[in-house]
């Protein structure tokens, strides 16, 4: 219980019947040992009336108010602070699981995977809380994996700061008998958790794979872009590839979720591209779906470039994978403008068109930045500046807004010009000229590379990173 009446007496405004200051809300969450219910206590330093809403429309069905001056009113909890500042409610997890809605909650042995919107009621009126903290009081042997940032100085793994991302953004959390660990990479600590499985995959199998992929992403500008993202690994049944499905979610903070074939070996995971692709999404803020070619394209470009830099792929193989992807993108281009293809990607199966068009545009931007600046600028330096100014971000960006910002950060017009050329284009980006600059000929017999110094140095600068290729590139450009 946190009550500071003097402060809030000063802040209260009679016109609102008790206005709310910039207080912190504290949630204390106590799961039952059998995971059939959650007990939640909410305390705030305030007096007057406020309302709370959950992030999921189904949440009211599983809610019961347990104590305090609070009432459940349909999709709202109405609470009137009287100096005590606390109320408690319970969430019936057993009933939620019985609905069989996998987007809401699903049981995996002694673990529940769910959206926090099932149980987290966030203040919405008269305004959101300035800060909200969640503390988990866990029974022995139980772990939790959430997307929110852990608070420094608090008991490890128990207290988290809820970000200000919209309640409507999806998230995923796990609660129960999890294997959990923390992976240190430059500039970040990834919080990884693996759900239990009857198959052989364990935390020891997964940590080297995720660690190597995160380290590859950190080669872009010397550090990982986000301070402490959630990584959740969910074992699944046999599949045609090691990671049949993965995604990045933005609710509560950026997180990566991998659904893996639990029968695969650690080396098979290591050879798979998916982890580098998904973690590369964290280089950008959340991009609106209509501009998915930006987010998916950059991630597709970097899944190959960064694996080459980290020694996970030979440079030649990385170029081959890129150019084979471009071929798939050309074949998948059905005449729709790129932004419309992005919007309809799932319904019409336009993944190759969207992913590889965006990757081609990333390559065009990278090469132009490097050549016009004598190697001083690149996609690396542009995204490093973006991380400095704008990450983490708690809002959605359009592709046009992102490209305008990248131009501001680089002092160029490279990105907005590419956006105007390609966002509404019905054709796959023309890579003829950039391939000539790179000295790459992609014919029926595979790739052939020019030995001309300028082209070789440009290829090396892209695939080796700033410490090994940029100096040679700048020198080659000066002697053209």
Image: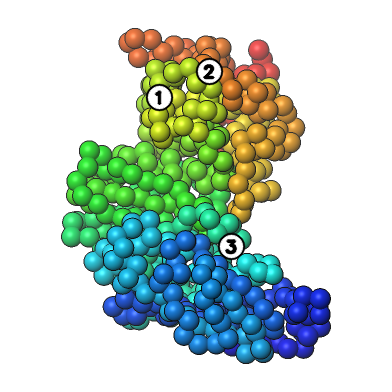
Q: Counting other residues with Cα less than 10 Å from the Cα at mark 2, is it few (<14), some (14-19), or many (20 or more)? A: some
> Quadrant of the rendered structure where residue 413 is?
top right
Name the residue at 24% across, 48% down: 261
Label 1, label 2: how many angstroms apart (C-alpha)? 18 Å
Determine whether 59 is above or below 172 in the image: below
Element under label 1?
Answer: helix
Q: CA distance from mark 3 to mark 1?
A: 36 Å
Instruction: Pinpoint residue 110: horizontal percent, then vertical percent.
Output: 26, 70
Left or right of 408? Residue 367 is left
**Regarding mark 3 in the picture, which secondary structure is present there?**
loop
Is any atom of residue 284 visible in this view?
Answer: yes
Q: Position of residue 91 (x, y in %)?
A: 41, 75
Tell me if label 2 and label 3 are in contact, CB under 8 Å: no
Query: Alpha-carbon distance for marks 2 and 3?
Result: 39 Å
Q: Residue sitting at 71 percent across and 87 percent down?
A: 4
How many neighbours does mark 1 have within 10 angstroms: few (below 14), some (14-19), or many (20 or more)? Answer: many
Q: Earlier in the sequence, mark 3 or mark 1?
A: 3
Foreground pick, 467 / 235: 235
Residue for badge 2:
426
Locate residue 142: give its quadrant.
Answer: bottom left
User: Of marks 2 and 3, which one's residue comes earlier in the chain?
Assistant: 3
In this figure, which residue is indicated by the disc labeled 1? 325
């Amino acid at each position: 219980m946190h009550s500071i009446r003097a402060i809030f007496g000063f802040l209260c405004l009679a016109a609102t019947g008790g206005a709310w200051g910039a207080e912190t809300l504290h949630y204390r969450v106590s799961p039952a040992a059998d995971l059939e219910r959650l007990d939640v206590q909410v305390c705030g330093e305030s007096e007057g009336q406020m309302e709370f809403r959950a992030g999921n429309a189904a949440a009211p069905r599983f809610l019961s108010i347990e104590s305090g001056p609070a009432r459940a009113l349909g999709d709202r909890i109405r609470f009137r602070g009287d100096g005590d500042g606390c109320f408690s409610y319970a969430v019936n997890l057993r009933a939620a699981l019985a609905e069989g809605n996998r987007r809401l909650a699903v049981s995996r042995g002694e673990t529940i995977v769910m959206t926090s919107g099932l149980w987290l009621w966030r203040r919405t009126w008269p305004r959101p809380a300035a800060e909200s903290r969640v503390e988990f009081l866990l029974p022995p042997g139980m772990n939790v994996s959430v997307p929110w940032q852990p608070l420094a100085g608090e008991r490890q793994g128990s207290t988290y700061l809820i970000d200000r991302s919209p309640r409507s953004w999806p998230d995923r959390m796990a609660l129960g008998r999890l294997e959990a660990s923390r992976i240190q990479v430059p500039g970040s600590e990834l919080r990884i958790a693996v759900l239990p499985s009857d198959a052989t995959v364990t935390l020891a199998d997964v940590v080297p794979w995720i660690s190597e992929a995160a380290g590859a992403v950190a080669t872009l500008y010397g550090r990982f872009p986000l301070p402490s993202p959630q990584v959740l690994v969910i074992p699944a049944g046999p599949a045609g590839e090691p990671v049949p499905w993965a995604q990045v979610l933005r609710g509560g903070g950026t997180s990566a979720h991998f659904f893996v074939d639990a029968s695969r070996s650690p080396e098979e995971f290591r050879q798979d591209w998916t982890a580098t692709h998904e973690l590369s999404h964290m280089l950008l803020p959340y991009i609106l779906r209509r501009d998915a070619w930006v987010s998916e394209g950059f991630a597709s470009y970097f899944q190959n470039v960064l694996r080459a830099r980290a020694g996970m792929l030979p440079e030649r193989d990385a170029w081959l994978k890129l150019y084979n992807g471009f071929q798939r993108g050309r074949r998948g281009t059905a005449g729709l403008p790129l932004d419309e293809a992005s919007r309809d990607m799932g319904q019409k199966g336009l993944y190759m068109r969207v992913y590889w068009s965006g990757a081609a545009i990333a390559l065009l931007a990278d090469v132009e930045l490097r050549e016009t600046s004598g190697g001083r600028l690149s996609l690396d330096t542009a995204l490093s500046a973006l991380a400095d100014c704008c990450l983490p971000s708690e809002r959605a960006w359009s592709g046009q807004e992102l490209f305008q910002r990248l131009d501001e950060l680089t002092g160029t017009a490279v990105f907005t010009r590419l956006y105007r050329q390609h966002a509404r284009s019905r054709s796959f980006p023309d890579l003829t000229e950039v391939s000539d600059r790179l000295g790459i000929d992609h014919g029926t017999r595979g790739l052939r590379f020019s030995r001309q110094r300028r082209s070789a140095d440009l290829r090396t600068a892209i695939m080796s990173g700033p410490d090994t290729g940029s100096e040679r590139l700048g020198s080659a450009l000066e002697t053209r």
